[in-house]
Amino acid sequence: MLQPVHGYVVRRELLSWNVDEWASVNPGSIYGALRTLAKGGYVVEAETASEGGRPARTTYRMTEDGEVEFFELFRQNLWRNVDTTTLAGFQAALAFMWAATRDEVLQAMEHRVHQLEGSINALGFSGRQLLTIPQKPDHVVELFHLHEAMLRGQLDWTREFLQRVRDGAYAFAGEPGVGAPWHDELADRGVVRTLDENDAPLR
């Protein structure tokens, strides 16, 4: 979104998303992660410079291999099966949803609605079956009720978010207002879909 960018800005941006809480990202690990990405060929050092007597800062830019890896991880988490233990992967994809087209986000959320509905139905069957086992304490079924309530909360949010996106909320790939220079470069190379002046898909 901001590249070329140095680690301080990456750290500040990620902390503004509270990733240290929901993704368990240690803010101090971000600089090391950038160096690891550089060793793997996913980012390259664009420039190292200092301003006003400050220590030199290295800026990084994503490589083509980095773009491929980003989109693979992004789509894995956007379309992933509902994970009942953590939302971190899905939340990460949500934070970068501007990289997808509106149509892809709509389809992914419709898929998520069906998954959540199926998970809730399966929990109902499991809870009722549990009550037929004499050796099980009756109160254990509350674990199923709690789990179902959390899934229903996700389902409610997904349906509401889906409607907001259908109604035109937010800017997605190929639409005005995305505001990421990197995204424009990807559109120029055909990595993401662009639109003509009538908002008709060109790709």
Image (cartoon, helix red, strand yellow):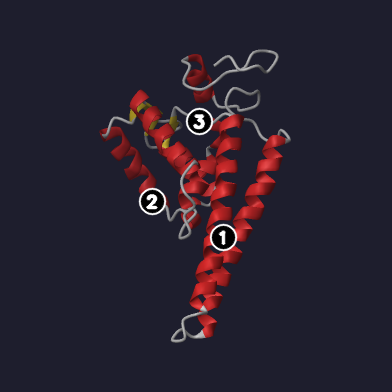
In the image: residue 87, left or right of residue 44:
right
Name the residue tied to disc 3: 2
Image x and y of residue 13, in percent = 52, 42
Q: Is residue 49 visible?
A: no
Amino acid type, callout 1: Ile
Secondary structure under the numbered disc 3 in the rendered image: loop
Mark 2 → mark 1, Cα distance in angstroms: 39 Å
4 over 77 or under it: above or below: above
Percent position of residue 7, x then y: 41, 39
Other residues around mark 2 within 10 Å, as few (<14) / some (14–19) / many (≥20):
few
User: What kind of element bears circle 2?
Assistant: helix
Query: Which of labels 2 and 1 is toward the front?
Result: 1
Q: According to the image, label 2 marks what residue? A: 28
Q: Amino acid under label 2?
A: Gly
Q: Earlier in the sequence, mark 2 or mark 1?
A: 2
Please identify the quarter of the rendering in which residue 76 is found.
top left
Which residue shows up at 57% across the image and 18% down it? 194
Give residue 175's position: percent from left, percent from top.
Answer: 63, 24
Disc on res. 120: 1
Considering depth in this image, is 72 or 55 the residue closer to the camera? Answer: 72
Q: CA distance from mark 3 to mark 2?
A: 20 Å
Q: Identify which amino acid the numbered label 3 is placed on.
A: Leu
User: Which comes sooner in the sequence, label 1 or label 3?
Assistant: 3
Residue at figure coordinates x 54%, y 83% from the top left: 139
The span from disc 1 to disc 3 (Cα, nearest Å) is 40 Å
Q: Quadrant of the C terminus?
A: top right
> Closer to the N terminus: mark 3 or mark 2?
3
Using the rendered view, name the quadrant where residue 199 is placed: top right
Q: Indicate which disc residue 6 carries.
A: none
